[in-house]
Image (tube, rainbow, N blue to C red):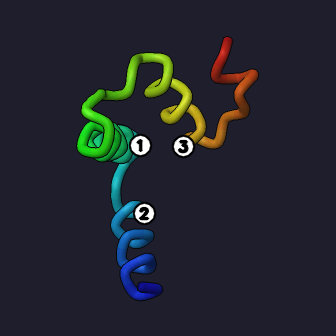
Amino acid sequence: MLGKVGTIANLLKSMNVEEVVKLADHLVFSKTGQYLDDLQKTILYGTLQGKKYTQIAE
């Protein structure tokens, strides 16, 4: 399992923020049947850019 985690981490490092958000959106849909809404995507996008919630909310 640890090997798979390392592989996933390396994959994520090679992706840009937009690709990670898109992947997350598809993963959430595959588990819940619902896509992320705009607010959820905005928060995820900002978090991946290292912003704090107060900065994202501006």
**Front residue (pair 40, 52):** 40
The numbered dot on residue 48 is 3
Q: Residues within 10 Å of mark 2 (few under 14, many from 20)?
A: few
Please, what is the three-letter code of the amino acid marked with disc 3? Leu
From the top left corner, tell me how far across and down residue 37 is, in percent. 39, 19
Left or right side of 51 for 33: left
From the top left corner, tell me how far across and down residue 29 is, in percent. 27, 37
For label 1, the SS is helix
For label 2, the SS is helix
Quadrant location of the N terminus in the rendered image: bottom left
Looking at the image, residue 26 lies above or below residue 57: below
From the top left corner, tell me how far across and down residue 44 is, in percent. 51, 35
Residue for point 66% across, 16% down? 57
Measure the C-alpha gap from mark 1 to mark 2: 10 Å
Residue for point 49% across, 33% down? 45
Left or right side of 54 for 41: left
Quadrant location of the C terminus in the rendered image: top right
Task: Please give the count of numbered marks on the rendered protein.
Answer: 3
Please, what is the three-letter code of the amino acid marked with disc 1? Val
Nearer-N-terminus badge (3/2): 2
Q: Which picture quadrant has residue 5?
A: bottom left
Measure the C-alpha gap from mark 3 to mark 1: 7 Å
Nearer-N-terminus badge (3/1): 1
From the top left corner, tell me how far across and down residue 38 is, in percent. 41, 17
Q: Residues within 10 Å of mark 3 (few under 14, many from 20)?
A: some
Left or right side of 46 for 41: left
Please, what is the three-letter code of the amino acid marked with disc 2? Lys
For label 3, the SS is helix
Residue under numbered circle 1: 17
Residue under numbered circle 2: 13
Whether residues under marks 3 and 1 lie with C-beta atoms below 8 angstroms apart, the answer is: yes
